[in-house]
Image (tube, grey):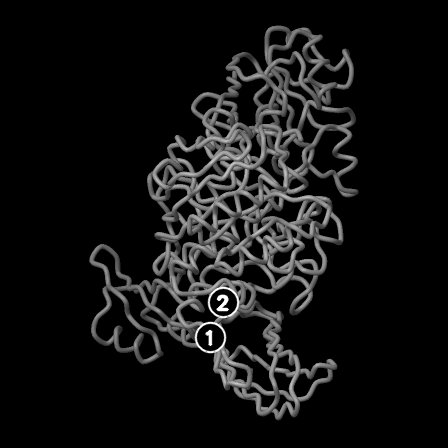
Amino acid sequence: MKKYLTIGALALAFAAILASCGSPVFTEATLAAADEGVRPATLAASGAADAAEGRYIVAFKEKPDAAARSAVAARGARIEREFKIVNAMSVRVADKAALAAIEADPNVAYVEPDYIRYALGETVPWGVIAVKAPQAWPTSTGDAVKVAVIDTGIDYGHPDLAANYKGGYDFVNKDSDPFDDNGHGTHCSGTIGAVTNNGVGVASVAYNVDLYALKVLSAEGSGYSTDILAAVDWAVDNGMHIASMSLGGGSYSTTENTAYTNAVNAGLFVICATGNDGATTISYPAGYAATFAVGAVDSTLTVADFSNRGTGIDVVAPGVNVLSTVPRGTGTVANVTYGTSTLAADALEFSPTGNVSGKAIYCGIGDSAAAFPSTVAGNIALIQRGTISFVDKVLNAMAAGAKGVIIYNNVSGPFTGTLGAAGSYVPSVSMSMEDGEYLKSLNGPTVSLYIGPWDYAYFDGTSMATPHASAVAALVKGANPALTVTQMKDILRSTATDLGTSGYDTTYGYGIVNAEAAVAAALNPGDPDPEPGDEVTETYTGYLAKRKSVTRTFTTVGGLFEANLSWTNSSYVPLTMKLYNPSGVLVATGTTSLSYDTGTGGAYKLTITNGSRTYSTTYTLTVTYLK
């Protein structure tokens, strides 16, 4: 399938991926836009927090003395440190009421979050933040975890990947050189394990993993089941812990089903993309019971239009507008400069590279020859989006003699677009309405339009979601190398942040993977292999957003079921527990504790609900029952 690698510095490119796991999908909501050449995009800012909950800076009107320290401590806060260069201290406080009391202290000037900062020069993609990877890094970065990326290969010389690349095999060409001649595998690999804190490129979710490239898909992005199964064989034989598989198809295979079951039983955690058809069934191998199926959400944590959903989906992860590595020089970066100002732009797909300068001549919507003044000849056409396709606007501008084209949005924000097919064009970019109107107001300013090669690109697809989940699994394995595949599956499911309908649903599964909660749970897993009838005690830690619920299923052979629940901010965050029997009938309720005689047993569902309209919380659930 076609692959888009044209991107802008601050905008996205809609990339065609492989085998229904990353192909461009124009849904009903975007058909009108597709007519003019728009690639679907999610441009809203990430809903992920940029500050860790419970960490604050308390600033004082004067340098804090012993009385000020005592006043802070008396309200339940823990003082972490004080500063000489500013009248402030860093504190840890979980109770919002206590925080409000500190803020009301007449000696306190203000209270603000202890914001998370990152090394400049390196981009932290929104997906890394959304899965809460930075909060897990103090405990695990995936060190010594072996991740096999079963895909199109890896550009193992990429400056953001070379240090973590450990080897692999090319099953397409049958040699030991799994170089990526497509781009898809390199993009997935960067999300999992791009070198982080090196001041360049992008950060990844599990930046100390060992990456292995198993090339099973050709330069065209397709491959045979037998090559893929050979790669799974290789992964088992060579002690891989996780197989990240952003590929799939629509047909069930008995051989595949048996092979993946055997691979998982041998200790390989197989994580797969659900597919990009917007369908209500998930593709294979994600659809097999032994594998772990991942759908895609955008930066608002809403399911992507293209993401397959249905029975068997386990979790979702970031899969829209995902910035990651691509084979060196195959990505594209674009910008427009005016004086000392650099304006964000995105190269239209199929635009040539180049660097042209001239006056930005306003040409309206560029829908006819009359829209173009004679002064545009030898200059750059500044055109507003609307009415006709982007390629027609560019062709009209070229007919008027323009040597470059800027198309700016007709609604707030940036957008991305395509010229539809390869052809002979002048360098052409898109930009936001705000920047376009700014250039228009300058009445023909001299600008430079640049489109050049880059080592990174923005892709969309469940293919992009899968490596996020694979990397979170690597963080979990790194935190506790003794975990079994079953335990890791349970941890990723039970700690996912619930989205959509409360509890499990066939659109979001158990929710978006949560690295912070998953790594915490990995440090205290349940019994990996209890005997039937054994009494087990299992502890789960998770994050529960306001007005959300999470449901866990416990299969018991009978007898007493007990649950105990604790959580942060308990003075003003009401949590409740409800236990349902195998018939779905509510049989017990509780807040901090609950118990029920399950009789002859069965599959009981325990739902925890956050009744607060304002606050989220982190909870710990401990259950004891006969498993």
First reached walking from the N terminus: tag 2 or tag 1: 2
Q: What residue is shown with label 1?
A: 526
Quadrant in which the N terminus appears: top right
Q: Residue shown at 35%/64% (left/top)? A: 109
Above or below for 536 versus 10: below
Q: Residues within 10 Å of mark 1 (few under 14, many from 20)?
A: some
* Residue 314 appears left or right of 310: left
Q: Amino acid at mark 2?
A: Gln
Q: What residue is shown with label 2?
A: 487
Q: Secondary structure at mark 1?
A: loop
Above or below for 135 versus 9: below
Along the line of sight, the residue nearer the viewer: 393 or 128: 128
> Which labelled disc corresponds to residue 40?
none
Q: Secondary structure at mark 2?
A: helix
Q: Residue shown at 56%/80% (left/top)? A: 574
Above or below for 516 versus 604: above
Q: Residue shown at 79%/42% (left/top)? A: 28
Q: Position of residue 577 (x, y in %)?
A: 60, 82
* Residue 370 appears left or right of 578: right
The answer to whether mark 2 and mark 1 are in CB contact below 8 A is: yes
Q: Position of residue 115 (x, y in %)?
A: 39, 55
Along the line of sight, the residue nearer the viewer: 191 or 345: 191
Q: Position of residue 329 (x, y in %)?
A: 47, 24
Alpha carbon separation for disc pair 2 and 1: 8 Å
Q: Residue shown at 66%/11% (left/top)? A: 424
Q: Amino acid at mark 1?
A: Gly
Quadrant in which the C terminus appears: bottom right
